[in-house]
Image (cartoon, rainbow, N blue to C red):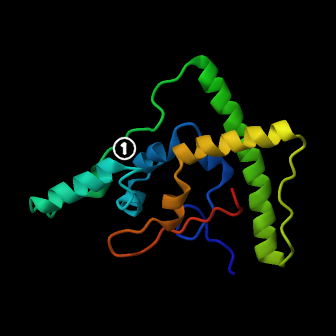
Amino acid sequence: MSIPSTFPSTNSIPPPCFYDIQGLAFWLNNNPTYKQYFIRYPNVFPVLYSSKNLLEYIGYSNFNIENVPLAPNVTTMSQFQLMKYTDQLKLFRKVYAYNSNAYVNYITNGTTPAYYRFQTYKEHNEYKSSVALVNKLYPFDAMTSGANINGSTLGWIIPFPL
């Protein structure tokens, strides 16, 4: 195994701060060159898939996927939901940072990774809820397996089992 490259290049580990309430759609709107890796995920970003197919069907060859705006997965929420989601993201980032460091240490030093140990059953259940939220905002399958039309993969690394 090799040391992952610097994010957001291919075969890199997204840093904990990457995961926020705005989600992958917001990040892609600010980094449009990466939208090309998500066109094969119509369940995640249907507008990328349908825009590309429609414009190719009518023969519009100058279509640029980078110009397609993506809507966020979460649009409105109450103050209570925002507080709850913020707490969930905070816990997810804490565990993610710990486990990412363990993974990188494993890659660089060959030591068995010692992943985060939950203090209580409640904390573990809250973490499971946070993973569900993050998976809605950041589709891990698309992030790890997304490929552009040339077959180049994005290959972002999720450094531990979720």
Residue with the mark numbered 1: 70
- Disc 1 marks a residue whose amino acid type is Leu
Classify residue 111 as left or right of residue 66: right
Q: Regarding mark 1 in the picture, which secondary structure is present there?
A: loop
Q: Is residue 98 or residue 7 the one in the foreground?
A: 98
Q: Residue at x 53, y 44 (%)?
A: 136
Rendered image quadrant of residue 3: bottom right
Callout 1 environment at 10 Å: few (<14), some (14 to 19), or many (20+)?
A: some
Residue furthest bottom as drawn: 1
Seen as rendered, the residue at the extreme right is: 119
Q: How many marks?
A: 1
Q: Quadrant of the N terminus?
A: bottom right
- Asked if 11 appears above or below 142 in the picture, the reply is below
Q: Identify the residue shown where x is 46% and y is 38%.
A: 73
Q: Position of residue 17 (x, y in %)?
A: 65, 47
Closer to the camera, 159 or 30?
159
Residue drawn where x is 76% and y is 40% of the image? 125
Q: Is residue 148 visible?
A: yes
Relative to 143, residue 71 above or below: above
Q: Quadrant of the C terminus?
A: bottom right
Question: Residue lying farthest left?
Answer: 58
- Residue 49 shown left or right of residue 19 in the figure: left
Q: Is residue 60 shown to the viewer in this render?
A: no
Q: Quadrant location of residue 161?
A: bottom right
Nearest the eye: 2 or 149: 149
x, y (%) of residue 85?
64, 31
